[in-house]
Amino acid sequence: MSHGDLIPGNVLVSGGRLAGVIDVGGLGPADPALDLVAAWHLLQAGPRQAFRDDLGCDDLEWSAARHGLGAGDGAVWYYAESNPAMSQMSRRTLERIQADTPPA
């Protein structure tokens, strides 16, 4: 099962640890790479690499998650006026993806 929307607003943290996940109405079967998208939404570079290392993700899985997130860049402009915080979160996520993407 995949949450599909593990963004900062849907993750509850207490004492620096995951305490819960909300907004789970969209749980469904998915590609396991979708479980990795939270790495860019929630983690900066160092913790994101530790997350990847701990999970043992290969390059294909990691790349699939990164590229799947890139497809969501429409949220930056879609929410620019109606939900600036969501727009900014999406922009930050895209910046993290860019910084994490190896040169072609």
Image: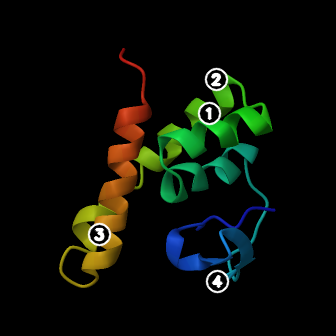
Residue at image point 63% right, 64% down:
4
Q: CA distance from mark 1 to mark 2?
A: 5 Å
Q: Earlier in the sequence, mark 4 or mark 3?
A: 4
Kindly report the distance in space between the C-alpha atoms of the residues bearing marks 4 and 3. Answer: 19 Å
Q: Earlier in the sequence, mark 2 or mark 3?
A: 2
Instruction: Give coordinates of residue 36: x percent, y percent.
Output: 65, 48
Residue 44 place in picture, x, y as percent: 48, 48
Give the percent coordinates (x, y) of residue 14.
Answer: 68, 79
Q: Colour mode?
A: rainbow
Q: In the image, what residue type sits under mark 1? A: Trp
Disc 4, disc 3: CB below 8 Å? no
- Quadrant in the picture for the C terminus: top left
Q: Nearer the viewer, residue 88 or 18?
A: 18
Q: Which residue is mark 3?
A: 87
Pick out the residue farthest to the top. Answer: 104
* Quarter that holds the N terminus: bottom right
Along the line of sight, the residue nearer the viewer: 37 or 13? 13
* Percent of width and height locating residue 48: 58, 43
The reply to whether callout 4 and callout 2 are in contact (CB within 8 Å) is no
- Asked whether residue 10 is in view, the answer is yes
Q: Is residue 73 among the parts visible in the rendering?
A: no
Categorize mark 1 by other alpha carbons within 10 Å: few (<14), some (14-19), many (20+).
Answer: some
Name the element at disc 4: loop
Task: Name which residue type carries label 4.
Answer: Asp
User: Which residue is located at x 76 percent, y 67 percent?
Assistant: 28
Answer few, some or many: residues within 10 Å of disc 2's Cα (few below 14, many 20 plus, some between 14 and 19): few
Residue designated by label 2: 59
Q: Which mark is residue 102?
A: none
Q: Mark 3 or mark 1: which comes first in sequence?
A: 1
